[in-house]
């Protein structure tokens, strides 16, 4: 079976910076529902029409990866207004402005009585090298398509 929209592509992924330093490598294969924004467009494009056994090395510029950093997404918050146990590297979901949508922030720094939050993806502003190895391809079931992500082995469990 070939990777198409509404298939589950199970892949091993390695992510390195543009100098080749390993950032992350999947220990277990990752299941991706194709055609539902579950991964970067460049990864989906590389996998499209491929079969199990396919391997690729992608060199993504900043725009193809997580985009440039947006310094307007960095905000200070008084430590007293922050949940107890705040640590650098932690995450916090906060409602944004009038829209009321939630935005994920990472705790970037703690400076005295101030916590610096960063709403950028941790890899924003970086070019990346991504290695893919396609382990298997299967048709997605209706529930996976309705939920917009893979379920079952190596996927999401409810």
Image (tube, helix red, strand yellow):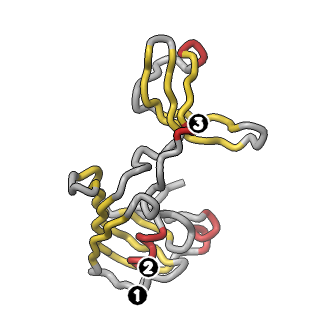
Identify the image quadrant of residue 78.
Answer: top right
Q: Earlier in the sequence, mark 3 or mark 2?
A: 3
Q: Which residue is mark 1?
A: 1
Label 1 environment density (alpha carbons within 10 Å; few <14, some 14–19, many ≥20): few
Tag of residue 71: none
Residue contact at pointers 3 and 2, CB within 8 angstroms: no
Percent x, y of residue 102: 65, 41
- Compared with 97, 116 (above or below) is above
Q: Is residue 24 above or below residue 77?
A: below
Q: Give residue 22's position: percent from left, percent from top.
A: 23, 52
Between 6 and 142, the one nearer to me in the picture = 6
User: Which quadrant of the view contains residue 32?
Assistant: bottom left
Seen at 28% across and 60% down, the residue is 14
Q: Closest to the observer: 83 or 77?
A: 77
Q: Residue at x 44, y 79 (%)?
A: 138
Tell me the residue that label 3 is attached to. 93
**CB within 8 Å, label 2 to label 1:** yes
Name which of mark 1 and mark 3 comes first in the sequence.
Answer: 1
Indicate left or right for 90 with 79 as reference.
left
Q: CA distance from mark 3 to mark 2?
A: 34 Å
Helix, strand or loop for disc 2: strand
How far is disc 1 from disc 3 in space, using C-alphas? 39 Å
User: Percent x, y for residue 124?
Assistant: 44, 49
Q: Quadrant of the C terminus?
A: bottom right
Q: In front: mark 1 or mark 3?
A: 3
Residue appearing at x 63%, y 34% in the figure? 94
Identify the secondary structure beneath mark 3.
strand
Disc 2: which residue: 138
Give the crowd class for mark 3: few <14, some 14-19, many >=20 residues within 10 Å: few
């Amino acid at each position: 079976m070939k990777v198409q929209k509404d298939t589950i592509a199970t892949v091993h992924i390695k992510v390195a910076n543009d100098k080749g330093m390993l950032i992350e490598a999947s220990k277990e294969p990752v299941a991706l529902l194709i055609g539902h924004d579950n991964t970067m467009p460049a990864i989906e494009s590389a996998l499209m029409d491929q079969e199990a056994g396919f391997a690729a090395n992608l060199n993504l510029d900043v725009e193809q990866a997580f985009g440039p950093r947006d310094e307007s997404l960095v905000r200070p918050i008084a430590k007293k207004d922050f949940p107890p146990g705040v640590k650098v590297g932690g995450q916090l979901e906060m409602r944004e402005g009038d829209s009321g949508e939630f935005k994920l922030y990472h705790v970037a720094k703690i400076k005295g009585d101030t916590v610096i939050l960063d709403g950028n993806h941790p890899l924003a502003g970086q070019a990346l090298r991504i290695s893919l190895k396609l382990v298997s391809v299967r048709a997605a079931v209706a529930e996976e398509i309705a939920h917009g992500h893979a379920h079952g082995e190596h996927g999401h469990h409810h």
